[in-house]
Image (spheres, rainbow, N blue to C red):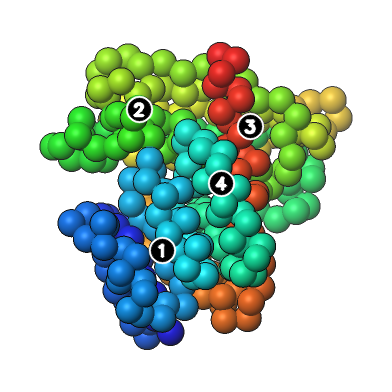
Amino acid sequence: MKAIILGGNGSIGSRHIKNLKNFNITVTSVDINEWNDIDNIICKNKFDFGLVCTPTYLHLEHVYKLAKNKINFFCEKPYYFNKDENLCKKILDCVKKYNLINMIGCNLRFHPVIKSINKRKLNKSFKVDVRFGYDLRKWRNSNHKNSYSANKNMGGGITFDAIHEFDYLYYWFGKIKKLNIIEKNTGLVTVDSEDVSTGTIEFVNGKLASFHLDYLSPTYTRYFVLYTKKNNKIISDDLYHINYPCNTMYVDEIAYFIDHVKNKKKCMNDVEEANYLIEKINNARKKS
């Protein structure tokens, strides 16, 4: 199989290239100085699928370049941050017209800790507290203020950088009834994007969640706590730490995608599912 990666010189693109080669996939990487030549590169090759690992503000443009050329695609999260209705419609039209297998990155769904939480435990719980934080200066190193994370116009901000938290909650509990978000830019680590995001979620099935996300925590902090009721008492489950990103979950994620491409099976978290969650988040942000 042959794959094209847009943005292969970044950290996540480099990771995907390495993992794909272990699956004996022939990879063509297109980096920033070649982006204007993407159409020509695609025309000269027959790719089985493509990966979009470019900055968030370019995701829709680059996904469309793959979709209009009938190439199955995997796009890193988030699918977009500022919706272009026309481009989203064109992508969805291509997906349906060409039966394209597609998936938006959701690697925490493949993390061993997330996978360890079974339906029985989720059904027993009525509430979950979610936490993620890491100092942006350590996360993006010395050039953190030049990174997309620090800049609104590039799709930055902790809310979408940590969309994984919203994603696995949605994966567990389904449709969202009500979402409240409070965002704050403390001015400590970003240019103009929010470095703190906190709020609550009520799901259609009655489950509740609270979340706190930030770019400020001195050490990498990622965990959740499940709560159950017993004899009119609230019982908190263990604190589940989601360890610093392990490559296994990325390998499992891309293996899942490759299998679905080979067998022409619909992936979870496709563009329609990802669009649903982003619209919920953006609608809540407008109200805050």
Q: Are marks 1 and 4 in contact (CB under 8 Å)?
A: no
- Name the residue tied to disc 3: 280
- Above or below, 87 against 48 in this view is above
Q: Nearer the viewer, mark 4 or mark 2?
A: 4
Q: Nearer the viewer, residue 85 or 226?
A: 85
Numbered disc 1: secondary structure: strand
- Where does the image place residue 248, in percent across and percent down from the top left? 43, 66
* Amino acid of disc 2: Lys
Residue appearing at x 46%, y 48% in the figure: 60
* Amino acid of disc 3: Lys
Question: Whole-Å distance between the Cαs marked 4 and 2?
Answer: 20 Å
Numbered disc 2: secondary structure: helix
* Amino acid of disc 4: Cys
* Amino acid of disc 1: Leu
- Where does the image place residue 215, in percent across and percent down from the top left? 34, 29
- Name the residue tied to disc 1: 51
Residue appearing at x 40%, y 54% in the figure: 62
- Above or below, 45 against 73 in this view is below
- Name the residue tied to disc 4: 88
Q: Nearer the viewer, residue 207 or 233?
A: 207
Label 4: few (<14), some or many (≥20) within 10 Å? many
